[in-house]
Image (cartoon, grey):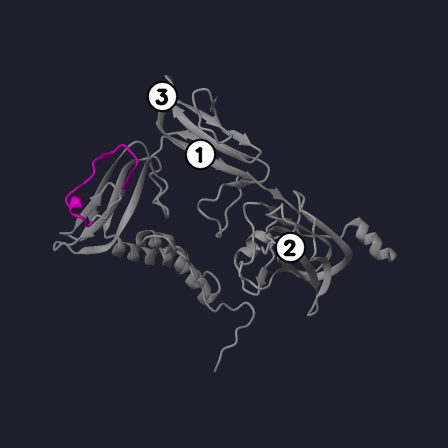
Amino acid sequence: EAYELEEGDVAGAAMSVSGLEGFLAVSALRHRLPRMAEALWSGHGAPGLDHRVFLADSVLMRGLRPARIVATGRTDPTFDGSVLNRRDRFAEGVIIESEAYLPGDRVLITLDGSHPAGARARGRRPGRLTTTTPVRFQVVDPAGRVRGFPWLRFFERRPLEVSVRGALPEGPEASPVDPPRFVDSVTVVVRNDMGDGEIRFTTDGTDPDTSSVLYSGPLALSETTWFRARLFTEAGTPLGDGESVSFVRVDRVANLARGRPARTGPSPTVAAAAYAFDGLVDPTRSWAPPSHAESAWIQVDLGRDVGVGGVTLHSARPWVPPRYRIRGSVGDGWTLLVDRSENEELPGDEGLRDEFDSRSLHTMRVELIRSPDGSWPRLVEVVVRPPSMLTADRSESGW
């Protein structure tokens, strides 16, 4: 007997690790996969989930990485390593020690990123690392048979560390390489882990030199900025590598649909709710249907019957007039509210603003129409606005 899915049911899920080697794929999935499995099974995070994930992860990683690695001299010793080990940092030097969990096993190590099973790795142990080094490990038993996965620890010599205060929190859809975002201002703090020297910085993306601005304390930024900093001796000699980070300013807008559940069709996508109705006009994050789609729409459930008087649509392609229709509903039927199917107006910085007679709506849908060049509009934010005084007066007076 066939099982018919109801709206909201999940038929399956997938997590992509395309392009990652085995040890990186494990790191990318080890904490996310059990939580996704729990959410699909029970629909929520059951009590004690974090503890059970920790126990399962400990058993898994002991089998995949059957050795204990201790690195002394890191500038952030409490950090246990991220997906790409971006923060195994040191300022002057780091000492690595390794110990296999099972008696008789050996730990093979390479310092050039090559596979540890090669003859060059046998019996080789690093002493003090003083330069940026990719260190790979592999455990073998007394007969020379490998145990578990080979794995990478990327140790970076970084005398400076840049941190940010006041940035917006990142959601689960964010990429590790996405720049920090902020609304009004953000504070940049540079830490000198070497202790000596002076920090020079720029805010236009150019490389700092001895004539650049001297860093003397936390720096407040209020515009989109490419911040770069570097450490110099008093004589002007650079010390170690510089640090670079971009900060993106976004605008917050009042949106009746902010945070409300949204879905797209005919094929669903996760990013729709996260980007199109988050109350932020952020050109770095947008949503568009797949290029091969024959039709496309995005709709939001306002949660209850809400008075609506207009919509503003922000596009990530300000040089292309977006074409679309907007419909509203309080039940099964849809009412056409806005028709820009032949639109030739560019959205500009303020987006495309439409007003209509004040009405009560429960659901709103944006039907996308391909541009003349064949591309779909790319939505940054769809702002659902309350009735303005103009539309309220017009509706009551019968205009």
Task: Return the residue nearer the eye: 294 or 37.
Answer: 294
Image quarter of residue 224: top right
Q: Nearer the viewer, mark 2 or mark 3?
A: 3
What's the residue type where badge 3 is placed?
A: Thr
Q: Residues within 10 Å of mark 3 (few under 14, many from 20)?
A: few
Distance, label 3 to label 1, CA atoms, is 19 Å
Of 218 and 223, the residue lying toward us: 223
The residue pinned by badge 1 equals 244
Region rendered in magenta: 117-134
Left or right, residue 288 beside residue 84: right
Q: Residue at x 16, y 44 (%)?
A: 120
Which is more N-terminal, label 1 or label 2?
Answer: 1
Cβ–Cβ below 8 Å for labels 2 and 3? no
- Disc 2 crowd, CA 10 A, few/some/many (<14, 14-19, 20+): many
Residue type pointed to by label 1 = Ser
Disc 2 is placed on an element classified as loop
Give the quarter of the image for residue 182.
Answer: top right
Image location (x, y in percent) of residue 143: 12, 55
Q: Position of residue 249 (x, y in %)?
A: 57, 39
Q: Amino acid at mark 2?
A: Ala
Left/right of residue 241 with respect to residue 309 in the rendered view: left
Circle 1 SS class: strand
Q: What residue is pinned by disc 3?
A: 237
Furthest-left residue in this view: 143
Q: N-terminal of the two: label 2 or label 3?
A: 3
Element at label 3 = loop
Q: Which mark is residue 257?
A: 2
Q: Is residue 209 above or below residue 392?
A: above
Left or right, residue 348 beside residue 53 = right
Task: Residue 207: give x, y in percent of width and height.
Answer: 44, 28
* 362 over 154 or under it: above or below: below
